Amino acid sequence: MQNDSGGYELRNSFTKLASTSKDITTIDIGASTVSVFEGMFDFLSYKTIMTQTVEVPENHVVLNSISLFERSRSFLERHSQINLYLDRDTAGLKCSSAAKAISEKYNDASGIYDGFKDLNDWLVSIT
């Protein structure tokens, strides 16, 4: 998946790499809502789930690392609603909690896969 610096985030079952500078990936269609994912497989899982529903137009951010959340904030906070689909580990939950303290626009949407590490793990378990 290409990131906003023109590099590529490369993933397989053995490694996570970036071809050049590590960066976020934004998908901007001009929507007022944005959904945020920690990694590309969570984003792809979300898109798979959404094919089964009436998909509402929204923008997307793939952080490619939870440590890049701050870099995404200027893009995120231009939206009226920000849905966080972060991992349900210590770092992801801490980031979601901190974001909700910043603004009411942030919504921790990870409750739908409570009991699983992330959205992708939940989707794999039900298919």
Image (cartoon, helix red, strand yellow):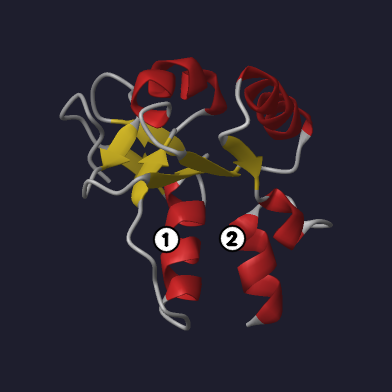
Q: In this view, does 37 lie to the left or right of 59?
A: right
Query: Which residue is at 59% across, 60% downward?
Result: 120
Q: What residue type is labelled 2?
A: Asn
Local crowd size for mark 2, using a 10 Å CA cut-off: few (<14), some (14–19), many (≥20):
some
Q: Which quarter of the image is occupied by the C terminus?
A: bottom right
Tell me the number on the disc at residue 44: 1
Q: In this view, does 87 lie to the left or right of 28?
A: right
Q: Which of marks 2 and 1 is nearer the N terminus?
A: 1
How far across and down, in percent of the image, does residue 23 sit? 33, 24
Badges 2 and 1: C-beta atoms under 8 Å apart?
yes
Spatial CA distance of label 2 from label 1 is: 8 Å
Q: Which amino acid does label 1 sit on?
A: Leu
Say which quarter of the image contains residue 6: top left
| Closest to the observer, 25 or 60 | 60
Query: Which residue is at 26% across, 34% downward?
Result: 3
Tell me the number on the disc at residue 120: 2
How far across and down, in percent of the image, does residue 89 sit? 76, 37
